[in-house]
Amino acid sequence: MAAPPATPRPPSSTLPAEPTQAKRFGKTRTAQSTALLEDYVELISDLLGSGGEARPTDIARRLGVSHATAIKSIGRLKREGLAVAKPYRGVFLTEAGEILAERVRVRHRLVVDLLIAVGVPAESAEQDAEGIEHHVSDATLAAFGRFLRGRG
């Protein structure tokens, strides 16, 4: 028996202009590319702050990746001027790496605080912020901050 013909759906909205849509998708691809570096510098900074050491093995375990993947990503951090690695001493952030780590940490906290403010459970907010934090614009983050300050 043949399937009934599909009922055409009315468009929920018209498609944006091609350059606008391409810009939106490009922003997402860029965010995905930098998200990895941001996660690494934030974790390295946290490890250095809590234990004074950020070893590739610890980084790999905490990010849930293989040791080889961590080494490859640390190499990228070094090429980008965000980290240095010292034999038998682990990974350290450069000044640029520390600045990026702090920016990421502030952005993460703001996203978590907003999610909690709108009723998301704390653990879910932490998990969801890991993805959201890399994709929101500065304008959106500023709006999050204004919203949260207005509630106080």
Image (tube, helix red, strand yellow):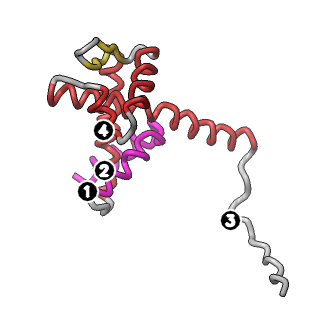
Cα gap from disc 2 to disc 1, whole angstroms:
6 Å
Sequence-wise, which precedes: disc 2 or disc 3?
A: 3
Q: Are marks 2 and 3 in contact (CB under 8 Å)?
A: no
| Disc 2 packing (10 Å; few <14; some 14–19; many ≥20) | some
Image x and y of residue 145, in percent: 33, 43
- Which mark lies nearer to you, 4 or 2? 4
| Disc 4 packing (10 Å; few <14; some 14–19; many ≥20) | few
Residue matched to label 4: 61
Q: Quadrant of residue 88?
A: top left
Cα gap from disc 4 to disc 2, whole angstroms:
18 Å
Magenta highlight on residue 137? yes
Mark number, residue 143: none
Residue displayed at 46% across by 42% down: 136
Q: Are marks 4 and 1 in contact (CB under 8 Å)?
A: no
Quarter of the image where the N terminus is located? bottom right
Image x and y of residue 50, in percent: 15, 30
- Which mark lies nearer to you, 2 or 3? 2
Q: Circle 4 — which element?
A: helix
| Disc 1 packing (10 Å; few <14; some 14–19; many ≥20) | some
Q: Are marks 2 and 1 in contact (CB under 8 Å)?
A: yes
Between 87 and 98, the one lying in front of the other is 87
Residue displayed at 38% across by 52% down: 128
Q: Is residue 26 left or right of residue 15?
A: left
| Disc 3 packing (10 Å; few <14; some 14–19; many ≥20) | few
Magenta span of residues: 123-152
Cα gap from disc 2 to disc 3, whole angstroms:
32 Å
Circle 2: residue type: Glu
Magenta highlight on residue 7? no
Circle 1: residue type: Ala
Residue matched to label 1: 122
Mark number, residue 12: 3
Chief SS of the magenta region:
helix
